[in-house]
Amino acid sequence: MGQRAAIYARVSTADQSCERQLRDLAGFAERGGYEVVEVFRETASGMKANRAARNQVMKLAQARQIDAILVTELSRWGRSTQDLLDTLNRLSGWRVSVVAMSGMTFEVDTPHGRMMATLLAGIAQFERDMLSERVRSGLAAARARGRKLGRQPGERPKSDRLGPKVLALVKEGRSYRWIARDLGLSKNTVAAIVSRNRPNAKNDLEMTV
């Protein structure tokens, strides 16, 4: 029997079906002499970080229960160039390869695989650089339009949102420490909220439990 393989198929939305991918991959496995251990299908965005079925495939690979992962194309497996490179490196450590239906096998510990890893690393860095450049350009354009970026002086989104709740709890006789713990704030933030709304609050309530 040939190499043990897991078939992995993914579509992005619920109105799509994995059936064609699974059918094509089953035929590909048969022609290539692979012993299919398990078949996985998943409906998830390509950019989604936590994909349950893919995680199961990785667990099989880590347990050395498979030798290869069969996919119709690499975009079905990797959610980005960096993610693809990271998973290929992990799989290489377990001596598991990713095989696309084009017949291209990705094994980082082979000369061809190392060449591909170098290319993928370069592409990943290029993508990061382009993203950084777009962010910088966007910030520069926003500043040029006179837009102030970041939280402005005096803005306190969380404490302002929780202010009424803090004051209500103070009125009930709760301590600052209890309120801070209950609402996920620091004791100083609670004191500041009370101080802003009740200037004479310092003598109103003991700030200990």
Image (spheres, rainbow, N blue to C red):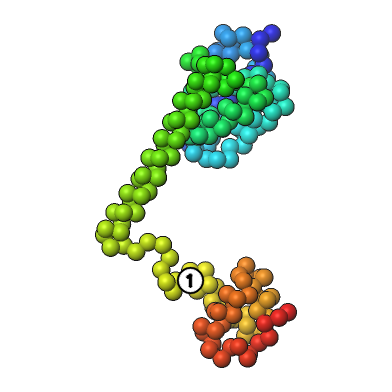
- The residue identified by callout 1 is 156
- Vertical comparison of 106 with 53: above or below: above
- Vertical comparison of 69 with 13: above or below: above
Image coords of residue 179 (percent x, y): 65, 75
Give, as a three-letter code, the residue at label 1. Arg
Quadrant position of the N terminus in the picture? top right
- Vertical comparison of 166 with 107: above or below: below
Quadrant position of the C terminus in the picture? bottom right
Q: Residue at 46% across / 34% down in the picture? A: 124
Q: Going by the image, does 202 lie left or right of 102? A: right
Image coords of residue 159 (percent x, y): 53, 72
Most foreground residue, 186 or 55 = 186
Q: Residue at 32% across / 49% down in the picture? A: 137
Image coords of residue 29 (percent x, y): 58, 13
Badge 1 marks a residue whose secondary structure is loop
Q: Residue at 38% across / 40% down in the picture? A: 130
Most foreground residue, 96 or 127 = 127
The picture quadrant where one finds residue 8 is top right
**Residue 162, visible in the rendered structure:** yes
Most foreground residue, 38 or 154 = 154
Name the outermost residue toward the left: 145
**Residue 14, visible in the rendered structure:** no
The picture quadrant where one finds residue 131 is top left
